Image (cartoon, rainbow, N blue to C red):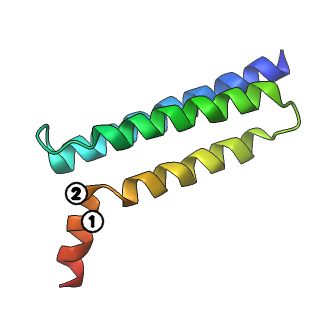
Amino acid sequence: MKKTLATMAVAATVVLLTATFSFAEYAIAGVGNFPYFQLGCLIVGGLIIISLKSKYEKMYTSETVAAFALYTVLIALFTNPVIDAVKAMVS
């Protein structure tokens, strides 16, 4: 039961972080410039982390949540709207 509850918590976090990424990118870029490839990579990465958490009992929930949060930030940094915003801030 504890293993299932921890896996469900990680899955909920993955869904919430993916939804936040999607909303933020849609708000910045709109429909025409939405990064679908990065969203797909984020979804696949989330599925891999959830499957690893369910397979290995010794992984802490906080570790998997932190790993996916860092992965989300990494994916978000390499989208065109974020790169354009950084270019605008620098120049």
Location of residue 59 with respect to 79 vertically, above or below: above
- Give the answer, above or below, for where 11 lies relative to 22: above
Say how many tags the image has: 2
- Are the residues tagged 1 and 2 within 8 Å (C-beta)? yes
Q: Position of residue 8 (x, y in %)?
A: 66, 22
The residue at 26%/72% (across/down) is 86
Residue for point 44% across, 39% down: 41
For the view shown, which residue lies furthest in the left direction?
32
Q: Secondary structure at mark 1?
A: helix
Give the image quarter of residue 51.
Answer: top right
Q: Which mark is residue 81?
A: 2
Q: Position of residue 60 (x, y in %)?
A: 80, 41
- In the drawing, what numbered circle is on residue 83? 1
Q: Residue furthest right?
A: 58
Between the C-alphas of marks 1 and 2, the distance is 5 Å
Residue 81 at x, y percent in the picture: 22, 57
Q: Is residue 35 left or right of residue 91?
A: right
Label number found at residue 14: none
Q: Amino acid at mark 2?
A: Pro
User: What residue lies at 19% left-to-right and 51% top-to-bottom?
Assistant: 28
In terms of secondary structure, where does tag 2 sit? helix
**Where does residue 73 sit, x and y in percent of width and height?**
47, 55
